[in-house]
Image (cartoon, rainbow, N blue to C red):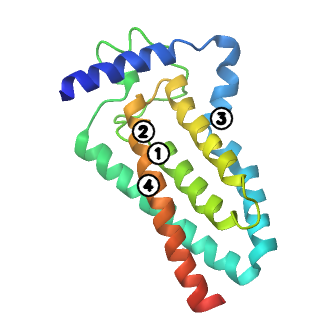
Amino acid sequence: MIEQLLELDKTLFLYLNNLGTASWDGLWLAITNKLYSIPLYAVLLFLIYKKYGWKALLLLVFVVAGMITFTDQITNLFKDGFQRPRPCRAEGVQDFMRFVAPRCGKYGFFSGHASNSMSVAIFTGLLLRPYFKYLIIGLLLWSLTIAYSRIYVGVHYPLDLICGLTFGGFAGFLFYKLYQFLLNKYVA
């Protein structure tokens, strides 16, 4: 059963990865680059400051730093524990794929890009939902786009992304609840 799932994962990866063309490579490399999300983060921080104030923003910075550290460390534990080679390193896959990324890490299960972007999307989407009802939809689409970029550039299988997105959603919700508790206890 697991072998069939992994084979389906490889097949879906190859199909999606090979949809790419050289004319779109630059866009997807920009999307997958974490630095290009900084303007979005700046806007979200500004919105949170405007709606909640300085004290809440300062608390948020610490909670979000803890959330990103948490998702990164759990992701690394999974990568080191499962040791599933990335597609760009996998026998029987690397010869049939488009490799666009500037480098290829060793292990890929599960995706740190997917878990981090989804945790930020859920956390900030829930936090700002009272003021911007549909913002969470845009943030979820942003996270899914980042996740797909990892297939496009050739460094993650779809299953890596599904698990990363799921874990990130869980982490985002957990840290949102933690933030709400701390906000009510120490700031409000």
Residue 124: x %, y % from top left: 64, 61
> Which residue lies under the disc numbered 2?
162
Question: Helix, strand or loop at disc 4?
Answer: helix
Q: CA distance from mark 2 to mark 4?
A: 16 Å
Q: Amino acid at mark 2?
A: Ile
Q: Quadrant of residue 133?
A: bottom right
User: In this rendering, is residue 27 above or below 79?
Assistant: above
Decide if residue 126 is on the left or right side of residue 44: left
Question: Helix, strand or loop at disc 2?
Answer: helix
Residue 122: x %, y % from top left: 57, 57
Question: Helix, strand or loop at disc 3?
Answer: helix
Question: Helix, strand or loop at disc 1?
Answer: helix
Q: Quadrant of residue 25?
A: top right
Q: Amino acid at mark 1?
A: Leu
Picture residue at 32% right of the left edge, 20% below the top? 8
Choose mark 4 or mark 1, whichever is in front.
Answer: 1
| Dot 1 and dot 2 residues touching (CB under 8 Å) | yes
> Which residue lies under the disc numbered 4?
72
| Dot 2 and dot 4 residues touching (CB under 8 Å) | no
Mark toward the start of the polypeptide (2 vs 3): 3
Choose mark 3 or mark 1, whichever is in front.
Answer: 1
Q: CA distance from mark 4 to mark 1?
A: 13 Å
Q: CA distance from mark 4 to mark 3?
A: 19 Å
Mark toward the start of the polypeptide (2 vs 4): 4
Decide if residue 48 is on the left or right side of residue 169: right
Mark toward the start of the polypeptide (4 vs 3): 3
> Which residue lies under the disc numbered 1?
165
Q: Amino acid at mark 3?
A: Ile
